[in-house]
Image (spheres, grey):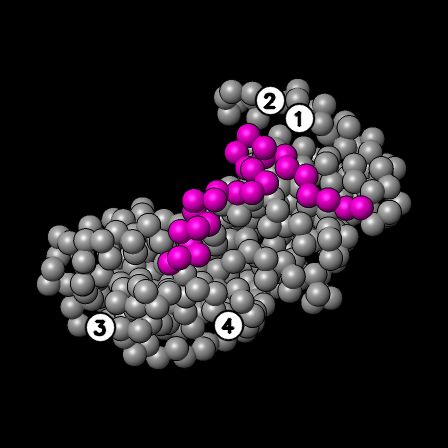
Amino acid sequence: MKYVDEFRDPQAAKNLLTRIERDAAKLKQPLALMEVCGGHTHTIYRYGLENLLPDNIDLVHGPGCPVCVIPMGRVDDALWLARQDDVLLATFGDMMRVPGSDASLMQARAQGADVQFVYSPLDALKMAKDNPDKKVIFFAVGFETTAPSTAVTLEAARRDNVDNFSVFSNHVTIQPPLEAIVNGGETVVNGFIGPGHVSTIVGTKAFEFLPREYNLPVAVAGFEPLDILQAVDMLITQFISGDVARGEARVDNQYARVVRPEGNAAALALMDRVFVTRETFEWRGLGWLPGSGLGIAQEYARWDAERIYDIPGRRVEDPKACECGSVLTGRIKPWQCKVFGTACTPATPIGTCMVSPEGACAAYYNFGRIDKAATAQLAGS
């Protein structure tokens, strides 16, 4: 395949769905398959894939939206930094509207704080060079997907000796939240649709702990409709073939056109040099997870905002009405949150899942569909 249209071909989708329906009929139990990445969630609901699958296949949203997993306390820390004298805070656009306890970064900008959105951390470094009278801080978020670009920027800041630039690192890693979900006992997951973007960096080998330690199959997938359907088919095949029953679950690579088993060696080496694994880090919906965050190595301490500034580090609970944590961990579907689509909308978000382009609540809301179970529930009420 050469072009994106081939991954959206209706006849190919029908053929795949026919095979999925045939194989799903052979399953001995229903399957709950967790799509880890928010990009997958948007493909699923944009194209209505959840309504095309057999009733015994349930797609469950996971903690793969990088903006959604940042807890409110870390947003408050960024707001505190933005309100300091002579500070210019730069971040990705989808972080601008994430609510803190008293405001979002966009609201802080309206109140006078110098907050700018950028497409790359290198843009923030250029702002520092162009504005020597400002202390430019990049509010860095994301999994291993975006961490290499932050690492490149820190290397450039050191090389060019840019003293008025620093990074507030909120980078996280993919393995600890998946382990927490599997071990938490609150979410039933029979297999995982692995995140394609993260896998371009960490490789498929990073997910081998799931079949090895938990006998849970994984299919790393791309982001087009046929990618998702093929990944679902791969996972079903591991069940009907008896591989899972024999304790021989494995990681399949549906996204082989981009992802390699070993990942991106150069990016991983750079991350190992620039970052250190934090002893623990707080996640929305999952609490404090050991070894799940990336801090900045001592060698780059001059550009570490957490060393330069006395950040309050106040931890804040989500609003009681917001159930983003439960959505992120697959315990509920977005439509089961009491404020979904009423008090909480993209225009008036209460939680991060409604703000981010990768958030599950935004996917449900923007594409105007609700789950089949929700339809039945509403019809019976």
Q: Which residues are magenta?
A: 248-274
**Residue 33 at x, y = what percent?**
70, 48
User: Residue 120 location, x and y as percent?
Assistant: 31, 47
- Tell me the distance, in whole angstroms, between the alpha carbons under discs 4 and 2: 46 Å
Label 1: how many residues lie within 10 Å, few (<14), some (14-19) or many (20+)? some
Tell me the amino acid under the disc marked 3.
Gln
Residue matched to label 3: 84
Identity of the residue drawn at 44% across and 64% down: 276
Dot placed on the residue nearer the N-terminal end, 3 or 2 = 2
Snapshot quadrant of residue 114: bottom left
> What's the distance in space between the residues labelled 2 and 1, CA to CA?
6 Å
Pointer 4 or 1: first along the chain: 1
Specify whether residue 341 is in view: no
Residues at marks 2 and 1 touching, judged by CB atoms closer than 8 Å: yes
**Residue hosting label 4:** 279
Q: Amino acid at mark 2?
A: Asp
Determine whether the residue tagged by mark 2 lies in a helix, strand or loop: loop
**Residue sitting at 29 percent across and 53 percent down?**
155
The secondary element bearing badge 3 is classed as loop
CB under 8 Å between discs 4 and 2: no
Q: CA distance from mark 3 to mark 2?
A: 52 Å
User: In the image, which disc is placed on residue 9?
Assistant: 2
Left or right, 135 with reference to 376? left
Q: Circle 1 is placed at which residue position?
A: 13
Name the secondary structure under disc 4.
loop
